[in-house]
Amino acid sequence: MATISSLGVGSGIDASSIITQLMAIEKQPLTNLQSAGSKIQTQISEVGKIKSAVSTLNDAAAKLASSDFWKTTTGSSSSSAVSITTSSSASAAGYSVQVSSLARAQTIAAPAVASSTATLGAGTLTLQSAASGSTPVAVTIEATDTLAAIRDKINSAGAGVTASILNDGSGARLMMRSNSTGLANAFSTTVSGTGLDGLAFDAGSGTGGATLSQAAADAAATINNLPITSASNTLTDVLDGVTLTLNAETIDAVTVSVAADTETLKKKIEDFATAYSALAALIKTDTKYDATTKKAGVLQGDSSIVGVQNQLRSLLGSSSGASATYARLSDIGLEMQQDGSLSVNSTRLDKALANLPEIAKLFSNSSLTDASLDGFGKRLRTLTSGMIGIDGGISSRSQALSDKLKRNQDDQERMQTRLDQTQKRLEKQYSALDKQMASLNSLSSYVTQQVAAWNKSG
């Protein structure tokens, strides 16, 4: 009897098609599990987006909860000759600044030689800063060192001096310049050996083989008619929280002013409203039911996410005793809309920012004994921090969904194992049936042939 090489060949039955159809029915529970798993993954993704949006809102609230934030200042100057930057420790004020002279760095120039490839001689060049406690730095110069090589050795010595080469028409000159301005950073150079005399310079007497191109000098100015001097053109320790940079000498006084940076304050309040509105829109989309399309949002009916929305709405609509002037966010122009977003009434907000101490209290006030006296910034920061904390509602929901997905994946694996076993069993059964049918067909053919032969012989 011939060997059966393909399922169904022996019997003529399309066993493969039958098994495929049977397995399609058996696989339906797995298909359902896969669909459920895909939905859970989508839910995890959306909860992650909501958690990120809450974190953004938390950052915005934390900024408004900081008392230092409400001290943010900005500086202005009537001339580019003096520029100003401020910090939160600066106080609103105006200053009159006159610059008599700028701080300068000492520069010396060696005599000209033919080119940067020329050599000078051999010996030691020692650089000594006038700054108190400075250490002399020695640079060894070989007879084969070119002017360019001497420049590079000085620059790598760490002596607080930068060397360069100037081609001025008469030849190449080695220039040495202090890295810092001010009299205290003047420097002298001494040499030993042969051929290096042109590199020597005494800052005290102003003499030597090198010539003085620019003398070290301190800046001299007056602030509100009070004289000041500085080794640097950047004045960081003259006015609290204020840095003045002297850029040019002046004839007329320059007016510099420090004021509250209301533009930055307003921008951060607007950023807060934007962060809340983005979160509200995300939750609305994820939890809504569209009656027209009869489709539910990914998180429709999710009590944890709906709870987040309700808590935030409740807090933003509440009142606070932090400020004697403003009790609600709507008092300063933060208005809740029907779609759940938070809009900014610029006119009302600008008016509130004119009363900076009270709007600061509305957001940043903190009470250890009475939570009703806490500002909205602190209250929102506390609420959102709890939501996204390890044991917070959003984090817990995310973990619950992850656990649910793990169970779903385990169920899929078990189901797949069972389906694999079922398919093997069906293939084995139909293979046996195929062989049996092939045997019966062969026997039937044999009997038919014998009957036909008997009939002929009769």
Image (cartoon, rainbow, N blue to C red):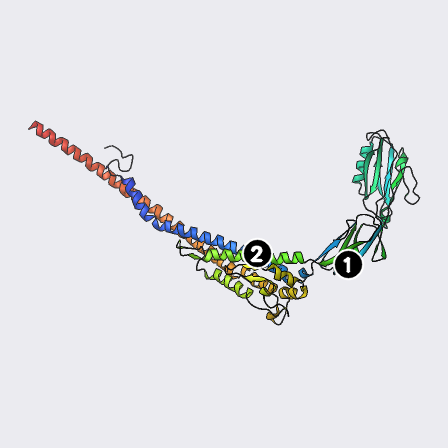
435 relative position to 86: left or right: left
Q: Nearer the viewer, residue 77 or 120?
A: 77
Q: Residue at x 48, y 57 (%)?
A: 284
Q: Residue at x 49, y 52 (%)?
A: 45
Q: Which mark is residue 12?
A: none
- The spot of residue 102 in percent (x, y) is 83, 48
- 199 versus 302 height, above or below: above
116 relative position to 357: left or right: right
The residue indicated by pointer 1 is 94
Q: Which mark is residue 274?
A: 2
Q: Nearer the viewer, residue 90 or 216?
A: 90
Characterize the local packing of mark 2: few (<14), some (14-19) or many (20 or more) Cα atoms within 10 angstroms: some
SS label for mark 2: helix
Q: Amino acid at mark 1?
A: Gly
Q: Is residue 239 visible?
A: no
SS label for mark 1: strand
448 relative position to 89: left or right: left
- 253 versus 354 height, above or below: above
Q: Residue at x 78, y 55 (%)?
A: 255
In which quarter of the view is residue 55 placed? bottom right
Q: Amino acid at mark 2?
A: Thr
